[in-house]
Amino acid sequence: MNTRIQGCYVAITGASGGIGEKIAIECAKQGAHVILLARREELLATLADRISKDYGVSCYYYPLDVQKLESIQSVFSKIEAEVGQIDILVNNAGFGIFNDVLDSTFDEMKSMFEVNVYGLIASTKMVLPQMIKRKKGHIINIASQAGKIATPKSSLYSASKHAVLGFTNSLRFEVKPSNIYVTSVNPGPIKTNFFNIADKKGDYVKNVERWMLDPNKVARIIVASMLTPKREINLPGWMNAGSTLYQVMPRLFERIAGRAFYKK
């Protein structure tokens, strides 16, 4: 039980399904009030109603496409006017497409960076002024092990997640004097609908299904870290050990594990 977040207001982007939905439910279980943000309003409305009835907390929802920067400003301004403060922001919205760079389109490149990077940064900018004023808050950015280990067919996705990690690590220094926590979450593959877009052929899922993470467990770990100075959450542990070895001895790691990279 994370008593630190009882009564806090937690905003989650990409909250209409997948890991975002699981994080929202877990926050509600711990007594936090939840603000759901995603494109699909009907799914948000259904989830908000379920959370309010099942856990007795306030649950708000706002349609938001983080690819549209002008919408981010208007939606977060509306939240501040109607709900008030946001104590914790979980930047979860994101997507990937597994393709060789030659087969990737300019639109895919543009969209991935607009959602995974620009939308994340813009959402963060909207909540920081109030957090700095109160000298309290937590930014949690859902990155990926792909941001640490670049593999074939994920050049654009890995690049976007490298950017998220760079932003997160720099932001941590910038807001530390204001007592604001900043955490990156770097999971391997999770059993969610992420792969409906990323892996349309299903080959990657078939190859790694046995190692895929349980989204409920991932959500519990993330929520347990809220309002703590946790720098990174890396899941699973064995994959993170691989990424650490990759940073230290990349040539050796690529020679040993290179064949495993071609699972997509």
Image (cartoon, helix red, strand yellow):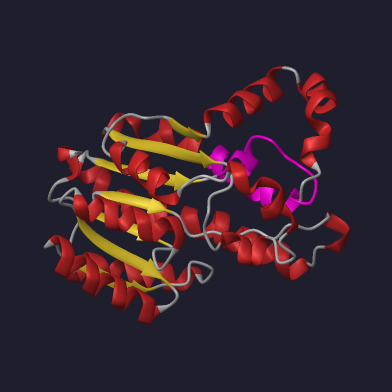
Residue 56 visible in the shown view: yes
Location of residue 95 with respect to 153 vertically, above or below: below
Which residue, as the protein is rendered here, is positioned at the far bottom?
42
Residue 167: x percent and y percent?
53, 41
Which residue is rendered at x = 47% and y = 40% of the image? Answer: 185
State yes or no: residue 159 in magenta.
yes
Rendered image quadrant of residue 81: bottom left
Q: Residue at x 56, y 56 (%)?
A: 116
Closer to the camera, 93 or 2? 2
Task: Classify residue 134 by image quadrant.
Answer: top left
| Residue 215 at x, y percent in the picture | 44, 50
Q: On the rendered structure, is 173 left or right of 151? A: left
Residue 86 visible, this orientation = no
Please state if 84 lies on the left or on the right of 143 as rendered.
Answer: left
**Residue 148, how many percent across, how many down?**
64, 35
Residue 227 position within the rendered picture, expressed as x and y whole percent measured from the top left: 26, 37
